[in-house]
Image: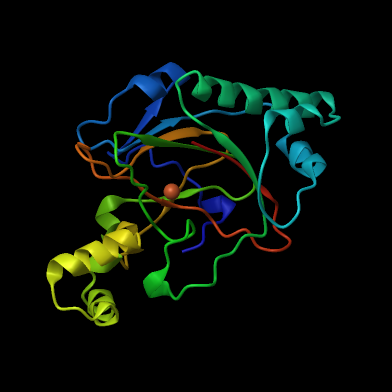
Amino acid sequence: MELSDAEIILPYDYPRIKVVGSFEELVTTPFADGVNAMCWVRQLPGDFGEIVEKLAVGKGITSIDDARLLSLELSAAGRVARDVLLQDQERLRARELQPSLDCINEYLNEIEPELLRTDVQSWHVDSATVEADTYLCTYHGAYSEGLRNDEAMRRVDMPVARAELRQLYGEKDEEGFREFLHEHYLDLHYTPLPHATPFSFGRGNLWRIATEHPGCRVPPCIHRAPATLPGQPLRLLLIS
Ligand SMILES: [Fe+2]
């Protein structure tokens, strides 16, 4: 299920993904006709590896603010990359969004058993109480991944998993069980079907994906963060 660079093909033919040509188009095109992911395909200039190297973050996830980016001593190519990072965040802030630039150094969730996993490396959809979308861009390191809706099933809908969860919950009433699943975010996580072929979000592309929220007209987009293992390039990621 892991994706190597050789397998990274943007599924332009996948009917739920719409490729757009500008930031304006990315943020203004409504999700409709089943489309639940918009991708502004970009070939970004600049050396993002230099940014990651000079940030020199510790293990885990570190949020990088503008001041820290601006304090870096960079080559010309590094400065080009920094301008992209600042501009992307500025664009999103101008839309009343709150982007976060994260550098991820060796992050692997191994705490929960598969049945109870609710971390970002487990296939999931984002949820919101009001209309809201998720924006994602990987500038460096392993790319975020997507899973086609027709190649996945909610974990809580898989008979064996549901029976185990039901046993764990213990109570008899169905309503209480549903609340239990919801409160623990278990109903947001998915399992790929045997024939599933995940796709990569690629490098530098800015994505806007649909979340599960009241009144959403399309199915939410299933996605996950890749594992970031020791010895692998650090990830530099924009998320909003
Ligand atoms: Fe997510």
Q: Quadrant of residue 190?
A: bottom left
Report whether 222 appears left or right of 135: left
Q: Nearer the viewer, residue 6 or 176?
A: 176
Vertical position of residue 64 compared to residue 194: above or below:
above
Vertical position of residue 4 compared to residue 219: above or below:
below
Residue 240: give x, y in percent of width and height: 49, 36
Report whether 55 appears left or right of 152: right
Please name the residue shown 73% across and 23% down the image.
80
Vertical position of residue 148 compared to residue 231: above or below:
above
Examine the rendering and report whether any part of residue 44 can be seen. yes
Number of callouts in the render? 0
Q: Nearer the viewer, residue 64 or 170?
A: 170
Residue 103: give x, y in percent of width and height: 66, 45
Please name the residue shown 50% across and 24% down the image.
92
Q: Nearer the viewer, residue 210 or 184?
A: 184
Examine the rendering and report whether any part of residue 140 can be seen. no
Q: Nearer the viewer, residue 100 or 141?
A: 100
Residue 222: give x, y in percent of width and height: 35, 50
Report whether 187 appears left or right of 21: left
Residue 189: give x, y in percent of width and height: 34, 60
Vertical position of residue 196 compared to residue 11: above or below:
below
Report whether 217 appears left or right of 101: left
The image's colour scheme reads: rainbow
Please name the residue shown 27% across and 77% down the image.
169
Please name the residue shown 82% across and 31% down the image.
72
Q: Quadrant of residue 124?
A: bottom left
